[in-house]
Image (tube, rainbow, N blue to C red):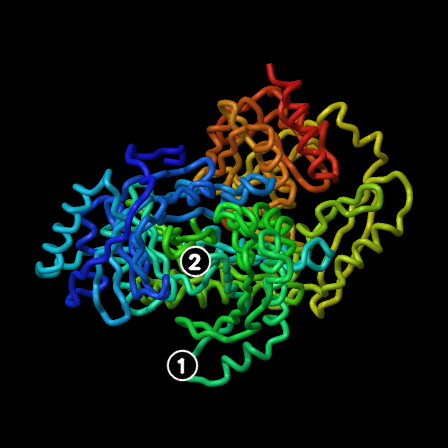
Amino acid sequence: MTAERSEQRAVPFSARVVKLPLTKAKTVAAMLRAAGADEWPFALVGAWGGKRALIGSDPLLVVEGCRDPFALVDQQPKITAAVPGATGGGWVGYLGYGLGGQIERLPDPPRRPVPVPSSLLAFYDHVLALDNAGQWWFEALWSNEQSERLERRLESWKRRASEPEATPGRFECGPFRLNPGPDAHLVAVSRAIEHIRSGDVFQVNVCTRLEAAFSGEPVELFCRGLEGLAPRYGAFLSHESVAIASFSPELFLKRQERRVLSSPIKGTARRDPSSVGGREQLLGSEKDRAENLMIVDLMRNDLGRVCRYGTVFVPELYRAEEHPGVWHLVSDVAGELRKNVSDSELLRASFPPGSVTGAPKVRAMELVARLEGTAREVYTGAIGIASPLTGLELSVAIRTFELTRDKAWLGVGGGVVADSDPASELEECLDKARPLLAAIGASLAHVRETGRARGVPTHVDVAAGVFETILVVDGRPVELEAHLGRLAASATTLYGSPPSPRLGTKVADTASGKPGPWRLRVRVQPGPKGDISCDVSILEAPEAFSGASVRRVRLVPALAPGGLGRHKWQDRRVLTALRRGLKLEGVDQLLIVDEDGSVLETELANVFVVLGGAVHTPPVDGRSLAGTTREAVIALAKTAGLEVSIHPIRLGELALAEEIFISSSIRGLCAVGELRGEQGFETGPVSVGLSSALWASWCPDFDATARAFAHELDAHTP
């Protein structure tokens, strides 16, 4: 459920603080299991507000998917009588990463395998607090309106505190698998590196997702994880839509009175108990220090928007902290809020956390939306509490399991800079995940480096190499970062080393050597010794490339077991043999079909099918190439308000299509006017309305293309 929803109780107008002792005999897990008998239980465990733990249940108000959750945390009761050191209650919940789209204008996120509410916040007028001496307290924001209910809650907790501990429940999950696969993350990181090298951005935090089947009780996963991880900002939230088990090490914001503190983490090194020197190696790493400093500057800028002039400073720069399986490089940024600045204004100035976006922040978030294979939900947002007594305290939602009835997922990622290595970035993600999975008794599915996982079909000579073809318009390579990122990922995966960082400059220089009103094709091929060849050829004059009439092709289905793989192979012998055997003509293209009848791609392009007014395209699952224009088409279709579905498509479904079109970086879009073959059917010319609208607006300027496509689509819609 993602629509705004709330229960009927209200936040009290005023309250006095009550603090009464309960017990010293119960563990955090025991008290949390006891709270599980009520609705909406939560736990904050670690360093929250100087307490060892806060636990609550039965909130006054629950707001799910709020239109403006930032404003919600400003709704607090007036405290008429306080107790030193008490928390009492307040708003507890999460703010999902996607809320950044309410602050900045961003592209649509990638696909959401399991959508969850953009935010979940509940107001608790009483909590259980565990102090450092091991004493549990019943703390309440006692109001006249809720006095009878709070009396019942107090008696209930006195009874539970004296009862025997409940028997632990059960859960099962795993193994966890990357979604999308490892090569997809290598491509995303490589593309981010190319954007950085081109001067588009300084740093991008690129993330991926680990998924597993799940069954059982989410609270038991959290309790088990607490034993082995001892997180600084552990948090458990249980709602009907989703449960959250977070073991975050990172403080996003802590606001007490007018003072605010952020402690961004950026820089990671594997921590091996059997060796020494990891801490010193991290502290001495120029790459990690530069990465950390960029985010420190970003947080200084964010806090500077709402703090008094001259009060933002860095109390500590670069300390190495020990966490499960890794060392982290941490810094502190502090400031003093201006008079009358509210928590909602502080959040709007700084959300989402800079350590999980990149720098510059908005451009990095735009690239995150384009590069990552799945949308972030709670992950990389914020979790915590806003209390009228102790202020605002939020963690960065990393090291966080998100749980539904039958699925669990864990986001992992890292900051990418100019000298990042894609393979090392993938390994860093796995380094962060392994201790978490071990703590809950789950496993990481083996990330294979050979065969199908690398996108290598049996009929390809890998030694022949890979290549890229890049369109050049008016002397400018189109989607250069995407092409070079894909090439770098292929070279790293297959041969162990990426192309030279100067490849982008070489491509641009090659393209500029052919002046004139031409569309050019640059073919880039890395050599066995790290050398690069760049050849340029003229495609056609601009008038021949007009959008006045979309090109039409005929597709001829051809069986290729396992597909062509996810790399652009120099070895094209299998395609030559298939074309020869099927006696293809000039307008024909092979439609590659796997043994199970799945439509994969054509020999030159990705495939799109219009069914029921929605745009469908096969997933990039290792059997086909992730075309650079494929992403552009998906983004443009979403901009136009069309539903886009990425799922397996069977050959027989094409007979029902309202339209079929294909896309490639060199030829743009082509409408499929005919489909023939022995495997079943033929079609005559089909509608070309959508492909014509998109083609008429196709241009190197992506943003302009999006606007033009939306306009053209309206003109072509009956």
Amino acid bearing label 2? Ser
The secondary structure type at the circle numbered 2 is strand
Q: Quarter of the image containing the C terminus?
A: top right
Residue 577 image position (x, y, % from top left) = 62, 45
Q: Residue at x 49, y 45 (%)?
A: 344
Crowd class of label 2 (few under 14; some 14 to 19; many from 20; radius 10 Å): many
Residue 660 image position (x, y, % from top left) = 58, 28
Q: Quarter of the image containing the N terminus?
A: top left
Image height of 368 relative to 675, above or below:
below
Image height of 676 relative to 485, above or below:
above
Residue at the disc numbered 1: 273
Q: In the figure, is residue 513 to the left or right of 236?
A: right
**Which residue is nearer to you in this view: 657 or 558?**
657
**Which residue is nearer to you in this view: 335 or 244?**
335
Residue contact at pointers 1 and 2, CB within 8 angstroms: no
In terms of image quadrants, where is residue 10? top left
Dot 1 or dot 2, earlier in sequence: 1
From the image, state whether disc 1 or disc 2 is nearer to you: 2
Residue 124 image position (x, y, % from top left) = 29, 47
The secondary structure type at the circle numbered 1 is loop
Q: Residue at x 54, y 40 (%)?
A: 102
Q: In the figure, is residue 278 to the left or right of 232?
A: right
Crowd class of label 1 (few under 14; some 14 to 19; many from 20; radius 10 Å): few
**Which residue is nearer to you in this view: 301 or 164?**
301
- Residue 181 visible to an observer of this rendering: yes
Q: In the figure, is residue 287 to the left or right of 322?
A: right
Residue at the disc numbered 2: 395
Q: Which mark is residue 17?
A: none
Amino acid bearing label 1? Pro
- Residue 114 visible to an observer of this rendering: no
